[in-house]
Image (tube, rainbow, N blue to C red):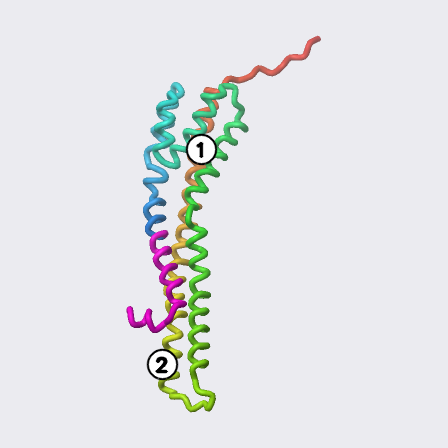
Amino acid sequence: MLSIIQAAGWPIWPLILCSVVGLALVIERLVSLRARRIMPPALLDEVLTLCRTSLPSMDVVGKLAENSLLGMVLASGLRAVIAEPRITEAALRQAFETAGRAAAHQLERYLNTLGTIAAAAPLLGLLGTVVGMIEIFGSQPASGAGNPAALAHGISIALYNTAFGLIIAIPALMFYRYFRGLVDRHLLGLELAAERLLPQLMRFAVRVPPATGSK
């Protein structure tokens, strides 16, 4: 492998860097996007049970927000109702949506970088092949009496860059698509959890009586 890297020339080093970064991102996302870390199975039911008779204290809400992304979204609704007892349903939905956008930003972290690696790796491999071909034909004598065997060997070495680029790009693209689907599934779960908690929280909102006109 080391001899192949040395023979492929300097264009292969950006590909090696892409492979290291891509592998690190895949491992990080596999760990960070685990379902139990994003949406603990029993957390929503526990919050619904806790809010059945009264709203929890701010200390409990703070611990809930630190529990997971689901906890952060649910805590945003609890904070909104505690801070503004006269909150409307539209305002409470807005609080959930704002927390959902923050959660989406965390879920999608590094995915653009992984997608860029998947798109750029074949181009870097092609660049390495083109550079290698230029060097090979540039080193041939003007008389055209070069060694065909050496020429074929040089072309095969130049193609290592393209092959290496595809080896990096294909898994990176597969993991990128997998993570995108996982993020969409988590976001849907967060949205459904907020919809379940919303009517529970609206029970604690103080209703403002409609203004009566003077006769």
The quadrant of the image that shows the N terminus is bottom left
Which residue, given by chain and number where applicable, does mark 2 sit on?
A: 153
* Camera sees residue 52: no
Marks 2 and 1, Cα distance to the nearest angstrom? 62 Å
**In this picture, residue 77 sits left or right of residue 46:** right
Q: Which residue lies at the image location 41% right of the left edge and 88% below the top edge?
A: 146
Q: Check disc 2 and give the amino acid type.
A: His
Task: Look at label 1 and name its amino acid.
Answer: Ala
In this view, 61 is above or below 178: above
Q: Would you say 119 lies left or right of 90 here?
A: left
Magenta-colored span? 1-25
Residue 131 lies, in percent from the top left, at 45, 73
Nearest the eye: 158 or 163: 158
Image disc number at residue 210: none
Q: Which quadrant of the figure has residue 185?
A: top left
Foreground pick, 58 / 177: 58
Residue 187 rendering spot, x and y as whole percentages: 44, 41
| Residue 39, percent from left and from top | 36, 38
- Residue position for label 1: 194
165 or 44, nearer to the observer? 165
